[in-house]
Amino acid sequence: MDKIGAVSEWAITIFGKTIIVDPVMLGTTWFIMAVLALMAWQIGRRLTIVPSKSQSVFELLTGFFDDIAVSTLGKKEGRRLLPLILSIFVFILVSNWIGIFPNVIKTVGTLIGVVHAWINPDVVYSAVWYKGLLTFPDLKEPTQSLSTDLGMAILVFLVAHATAIHNKGVLGYVRSFIDDPFPMKGWKVLFFWANPFFYLNLIGQVANVVSHSFRLFGNVFGGGIIIIIVSELLRHFLVPVGLFAFFGLFSGLIQAFVFSMLTVSYINQLQ
């Protein structure tokens, strides 16, 4: 239990500033991005009229999110932003699920060890062939890092506001904060600074970024802590398998979907 909460860190100094980096988290993030890019390239170059299983999965996801984006943002805007929305969903989903595999591998190794010990009570675990399963390195979910979640939330924030400026123009974009909820026409617009709702609208946009990132971080991090504690107590046997299925698979899927839907919602608010 003493290793719970322990984080490996690299301290990198750039221009006199020290930056703390988690190498496991960083490596896992780049590994996921590389795998997803390779999968997209492979599937994209092998598109067929009769889809393969992998192509069918991506077509199903694309059609599902296309219906949501088009019905919420309109056909033109929805189709233009569909790649972003779908990419966010897939990245978060894989990021939430990546931590399951080491625990499943260790569980399999533990079950093999139990059977082996039952057959041969004098087994020496340092020399068994499945030692690699028992000592398989952990992979941290990138979404357990607030930096990752905040980075995606800021990306959504920038896209939402850039889309609003593109559709409304700069003046219309500024007026959307001044005139909500009470339009200020004529000379009254010069006193927009006296309108408390103007400041509330600005605070609301910042609050969207905070809530968007902390919601995902809190759910993923909390589920990960529960899995770690129970796994340490029961040594990856039986009960943790059920926890992996819930917090890893089900909850990971729900959190990816919620983050994607909030992305659509925040963009739609500024239209």
Image: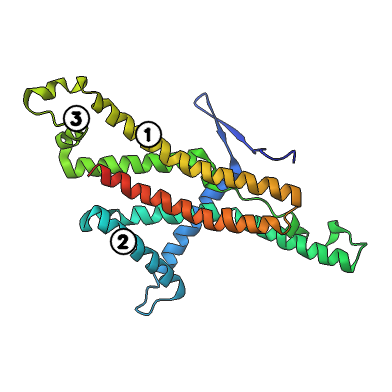
Residue at the disc numbered 2 = 66
The amino acid at mark 1 is Ala
Mark 3, secondary structure of its residue? helix
Please tell me whether residue 205 is drawn above or below residue 130 in the rendered image: above
From this view, report whether residue 220 is shown above or below residue 16: below
Callout 1 secondary element: helix
Residue 98 shows in the view? no
Q: Establish if 160 lies above or below 80.
A: above
Viewer-proximal residue among 179 and 142: 179
**On screen, 228 above or below 12?**
below
Mark 3 or 1 closer to N-term?
3
At a point 88% along the width and 69% down the height, the residue shown is: 119
- Observer-nearest of 3 and 223: 223
On the image, numbered disc 1 is attached to which residue?
A: 207
Count of numbered marks = 3
Q: Residue at x 32, y 50 (%)?
A: 264
The 10 Å Cα crowd at callout 1, few under 14, some 14 to 19, many 20 or more, is few
**Marks 2/1: CA distance?**
27 Å
